[in-house]
Image (cartoon, helix red, strand yellow):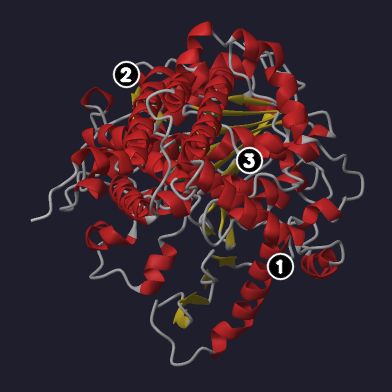
Amino acid sequence: MEKINLPKTLKNNNHITFFAIAVVLFWIKTYAAYQIEFKLGIDNNLQKFLLFINPLSSAFLFFGIALLFKKHVKLVMIIINFLLSFLLYANIAYYRFFNDFITIPVIMQTKTNAGQLGDSAVSLMSPLDIFYFSDFIILIILALTVFKKVTVQTRKSFKIVLLFSITVFLFNLGLAEKDRPQLLSRSFDRNYLVKYLGAYNFTIYDMIQNIKSSSQRALADSSDITDVENYRKANYAKPNPKYFGKAKGMNVIYVSLESFQNFMIDYKMPNGQEVTPFLNSLAHDGKTFYFDNFYHQTGQGKTSDAEFLMENSLYPMSQGAVFVNKAQNTYQASPAILKGLGYNSAVFHGNYKTFWNRNVMYKALGYDQFFDAEYYDMSDENIKNYGMKDKPFFKESMPMLESLKQPFYTKFISLSNHFPFEMDPQDTDFPAGDYGDTVVNQYFQSAHYMDQALEQFFNDLKKDGLYDKTVIVLYGDHYGISENHNEAMAKVLGVDKITPALNAKLQEVPLYIHVPGVKGGVQHQYGGEVDVRPTLLHLLGVDTKDYMEFGSDLLSKDHRNWALFRNGDYVSPKVIQVSDKCYSTNTEELLPDNSSCKDIDEKVKTELQMSDEVVYKDLLRFYKPEGYTPINPDDYEYLGPKGTTKATGTEAP
Ligand code: GP9
Ligand code: MN
C-alpha cells in the first residue's frame, strides 16, 4: 500500500485553504453588514436562513473564478475581494443616505447622485467602517506570509467549486421562490431581492435587466414613432364639450383602492349588511360618476401597473413590472403635464419607497414629492401586511396634504385591503364571510374597513374645505380574489360555477370620479384604466390630442366602449374574448365561432403592439407633444422627512 504523504497533499491544496479562509471571512463580513446596516424586514425563519446563506453562494462563485488563474491565484482572489468589498461598502454608504441599494442606472447618473451624496455621504462614513475591508487586509497579510508560495496545481478544484456554488445558489433561489413566488420575474422590491438573494447577486440581476432593457432601446430610432403617431391620431376620441374644462384649476386626488373588485359594490352579506356602505352611497348619490363596466388592465406589476396605466395611458409590460424595468424611459405623465399648468404633485403611500421601484419611477413621472413610510408612524399597531393600515394612513396624511401648494395633483395608495386580507381583531367588528375559504371570507372584513377609512378621509376633506375644490378619482387597482378561489367565489355570487366569461367580468373594478358642481350618475360604458387619463385631463381642460396615449375619454361621445386585458383578452357590451374563444357578454355562453369577436380582437392586438413599441423601445424620447415642457427626472429627489427636497412644491414637513 502506498504511503500517504500528508504534508505534500496539504501543500498541494494550500490554495484551497486560502480560498476557504477568503470565503468564510467574506461570508461573516457580509452577514454582519446585513445585520448592522440594512433594514430588510425579515419576517420568518426561512428568510433569516436565506439571509444567512446568501453570501455563501456569491463567495464561492466569485472567489472560485480566481482558481482559474494558476500562478496568480492569491492576487486575483484579493482583487476580487476588493471589488466585492467596494461594492458592499458603496451600497452601505448609499443606503445610509438614501435607504436604498445602488442600481446600474444610479451609477450611470453619477452626475446627479454624486452631487447628492457628496459631503453628506462622507459625513456618514466612520473609521470603524474599515471593518468592511478587514477580510481584504487579512488576505493580503496571509498571502505575504503563511501562503507565500501557494499556486494552483490543477483546475479540477475550480470545477468542484463552481459546481458547489451553483448548487448552493439554486438551493438559495429555490427557497426564495418558495417564500416569495415569482421573485425574479416580478422583481417587486430591491429590498426583497437583497434579502432573498444577497447584495452581490442583486447587482448581477440588475446588470442583466439593464442590458436587456438597453438593447431593446438601442434598436429603436426616431422613425419608429411615426406609426404610433398615426395610430394615435386615428383613434383619438375628442372631448365632450359638456364636460371639457369643468374641473379647470381644481386640485386632483386619486385614491388607489387596493385589490378592490366591483362585485363588492352593493353586495350584501346574508344578514343583509352592506360591505361597503360608503362606496355604495357614492355610486348612487347622483353627484359622482360611477362606472360599473370598468376593468383593471394590470399585469405582474399589480398596483404599480395600475398607476402606470392611469397616469400615462400606456399599457404595462406583458411580463415583469414596467415600474422596475422601464423606469429610465422618457414619459409624459399626468404630473409632468400638469406641472406646466402650475400644479404641484405628490404621492402618499404607507409602504417603503423602494417597493415597485417607486422612488425611481416617480421621478420619471414628474412627481414633486413622495410621502412614503418614512413620513408615517409605522409602529406595530398601525401596520399590517404590506404596511400602513388605511385609517391611520389617511389620518396622518391630512396635515401633509394640507401643507401642499394648490392646485395639487395627488395620489393616495391604500393598502389594508391586500391579500391575504387578514385583519387585527380590534380593527373589525364586521362578520367574516362563510364561503369555506379563509381568504375570501376575510376579504369582506378588510373591504369594509377600507370603506370606513374612505368615509373618514372624505369627512376630513369636507372639514378642511378641500372637498369643494378637488376632483376625486377612486379606482380599484386590480383583482383581489384570484382564480384559485373561484369555488368560493361561485358561492359568493350564487352561481354554479365561474365560467371563463364570468371570470373576465370579475376583473371589473370600480371607478368613481367626483367633480364639484358637476352632475354625475351611474355610467355603463365599457372602459379600462388606460382610459382614465384622457377623461381626467379633458375635465381639467387639457387638450390631449398631441399626447401619445392609448386610452379614450370615457365621457366622450366617441368613446370606443371596450376594454382589453394585458393578455390580449377583452370585454365589450356584446362579446367577451378569453384565450381566443368568443363568448356572449349577456349569456356568458361560448359562441359557435369567433366571427363576432374578430373586429375588436384585431384592434386589441394592434393597440397592445403599438403601446409595447412605445414602452419597450422608449419611443417617447423621440417625441415632444405641442406645448409640453419636458421634465428632467434628475431634478427630483425624495430624501424623506429629515432630508431636504430638491423638487419644487412645498418643503418636506
Ligand atoms: C405595496 C402595494 C401593494 O406598496 O403597492 O402591492 P401589490 O402587491 O398590490 O402590487
Ligand atoms: Mn395592489
Q: Residue at x 50, y 13 (%)?
A: 129
Q: Nearer the viewer, residue 212 or 228?
A: 212
* Residue furthest out toward the right: 627
Residue bearing mark 2: 380
Say which element carries label 2: helix
Task: Give the Cα distance between marks 1 and 2.
Answer: 46 Å
Task: Give the Cα distance between marks 2 and 3.
Answer: 34 Å
The relative height of residue 541 versus residue 376 in the rendered view (above or below) is below
Residue bearing mark 1: 610
* Relative image position of residue 127 (x, y in whole percent): 53, 7
* Residue furthest out toward the front: 2
Label of residue 600 in the image: none
Residue bearing mark 3: 104
> The disc labelled 2 sits on which kind of residue?
Asp
Q: Nearer the viewer, residue 541 or 167?
A: 167
Camera-nearest label, 3 or 1? 3
* Residue furthest out toward the bottom: 592
Of marks 2 and 3, which one's residue comes earlier in the chain? 3
Task: Give the Cα distance between marks 3 and 1.
Answer: 28 Å
Label 3 packing within 10 angstroms: few (<14), some (14-19), many (20+): some
